[in-house]
Structure formats: C-alpha cells, structure tokens
Amino acid sequence: GLYYSFYKKLIGEPSFLEGLNQITNDNVTEYGHTINTLKRFNLYPEVILGIAFKLFRKITDRSHWVVERCWQVNRGDVLPPVVSCEGIGNEHYFYVTMVFALASTVAATIFLFGVLLSDTILGGLVAVCCFFFNHGQATRVQWTPPLRESFGYPVFLAQIFVVTYVLRHIKKGILWSVLIACFTTTFMLFWQFSAFALTTQMGSLFTTFILDFIPIRTMSTILCGHSIILFLDRYFYCITNRPLYMIINSILFITGTGGIKLTISHLMHVEDDAHIMDLLRAKFTTFANFHTRLYTCAKEFDFIGSE
C-alpha cells in the first residue's frame, strides 16, 4: 500500500506538478525529516502511471466514453453508505491493469529467449511451459502488484534478451548500445535492487570476455550500453601470458567497479542505498538493524535450499 499511496497522491491533486512536489518534499513518511520519496522509494513507475491516468481520463471524458461504473453500497443503519466503482477508469483498476499488462510481456520475452537460443519455435514453447509450471516461484506480481520488482523484472528480461541477441549474432554499433542503455536505465529507475542483478550480469560477461568467447567489438557495444569504455583493452592484448592477462582484467574489474561506486557515493553524499549493503552484511555476518530484519524475515531473501 505504500507505493500505491504515492500514486493516489499524484493523481489526487488538481495539478500533477503539485502532487510531484509533495512526493519530492515529503515530511510525513519519515517523521522529523523532509525526504525525496521519488528517489528514496523508486517511485518512477507511479509517476509514469499517474501521468498516463490523468491523460487517459481527459481523453475519455472528452470522448464521453464510459470507462467506470459506480454504485452506492448501503451498510446498514449505523454506517453511512459508500460508493464503489469498477472499470479501467477507476484509479485502482487502472494501476493494477497496467502492472499486469507489463507482467504479461514476461511470457512473450521468455518465448523469444527459447526461440533465440534453440533456433526453433518448439524451444520457445518449452520455455514458456516451464515458466508457467514454475509461475509461483518465478514472480510475485499476482500477490503484490505494487512491488518494485513487478515493474523492474519485465524490463530486465527485455534487457537480457537484447544482450543475448547481440552476443549470439555478433552485433555491434551505437544503435545496439543505445537500446541496451535505455533498458538498463529504465530497470535501474524501477527497482532498487537492480545494481545486484546488473553487477552479476557484467561479471558474467566480463568472465566470458577474458576467456576470449566474446569479440572485442561486441563487448564494447554491450559495455557502452552500461556506460563503460574498454579504453585499456588495446594494451591488455600486448600481454602474451594468458593467466596474467585474466588476473589483471579480473582485478581491474573488481576494484574498478567497487572504487567507482564508493567514490561517487562519497562525492555525491549518496546514502539512499545504504540498506542494500546492510543486507549483504546481515546475510554474511551477525550485523542486524531494522531494515535488515524487515527484509530477511521474508523467504525471498533467504539462502536457496539444497533441494
């Protein structure tokens, strides 16, 4: 309900800018502080849906389309009657419908994955069947639509598909870099845990690259989409000792990734993602605070069992 409440605040104001100002200067959510909840809670999906809902209602009102049906519900002599509505013109129905519409792209993307990797339609059908068979473990959108992963997961799958297509067909060029950058940026805006997934992706890509499974031009195309440039690669190829080459690349990747992150956080005084590092500390040490206990009580944040 937290994320949805900000969506209602955005569409409830006469002016959308007034609602946007309220969530960027919020002094209610965190007692004693005025915070930018748009950035703190990754409310960019709610902003997009808020704009879409206001435009949708303006168009339907001018066109006199019936998109909402309401009726009065009597609750006895003690309680006053309430108005109940249904239809896509209702703000709640609109929100949930858009979330499920985005979630519906997951099956299509997985089908394309199956076709791409197997070069057959049958491979796509098998992949989709496996997704539906394991649907309860593959997504939580059916239970909690407003979660950030409900918006980020479909975008991330699309990003992975583009990266896989580039690798499989040895694509290169600025257009592919821009496409990867668009999906990556959207994914990072929608989900606060996107950094973990993208770091894992980059680690996997970098491992295949230093093992010479990916051409330099293809790797450059992907990394440009991640805003990383292989400016030292021409010098690395002068190293004829392959184990030394792999060790140097690995050290630079790990130290460079961590160093850039820590430097930017220190210079920009960014502390909004501190709870993410706290989660890692809590999983591997005895450290615990309110946020880590809140997250780790859910089985989704537990270690994968041996079965």
Image (cartoon, rainbow, N blue to C red):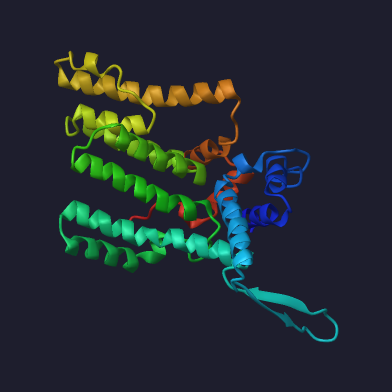
235 lies left or right of 271: left
Residue in the picture at 73% in, 53% down: 13
Q: In this figure, what is the number of numbered marks? A: 0
In front: 244, or 273?
A: 273
Q: Does residue 307 appear in the picture of this structure? A: no
In front of the other: 76 or 61: 61
Quarter of the image with the N terminus in it? bottom right
Q: Position of residue 171 (x, y in %)?
A: 22, 37
- Say which residue appears at 41% left-offset and 40% top-offset: 182
Q: Is residue 243 above or below residue 53?
A: above
In the rendered image of this protein, does residue 105 appear above or below residue 195? below
Q: Residue furthest front?
A: 63
Corner quadrant of residue 287: top right
The location of residue 119, given as percent across then percent down, is 15, 55
- Position of 131 with respect to 148 (left or right) is left
Is residue 1 visible to us here?
yes
Pick whichever, 125 or 192, lies toward us.
125
Residue 224: x, y in percent? 34, 29
Residue at figure coordinates x 85%, y 83% from the top left: 78
Name the quadrant of the C terminus: bottom left
State which quadrant residue 130 falls in: bottom left
Residue at 57% of width from left, 55% of height from top? 52
Residue 72, image quadrant: bottom right
| In the rendered image, the vertical position of residue 256 relative to residue 131, given as above or below | above
Q: Residue furthest right?
A: 78
Q: Position of residue 91 (x, y in %)?
A: 63, 64
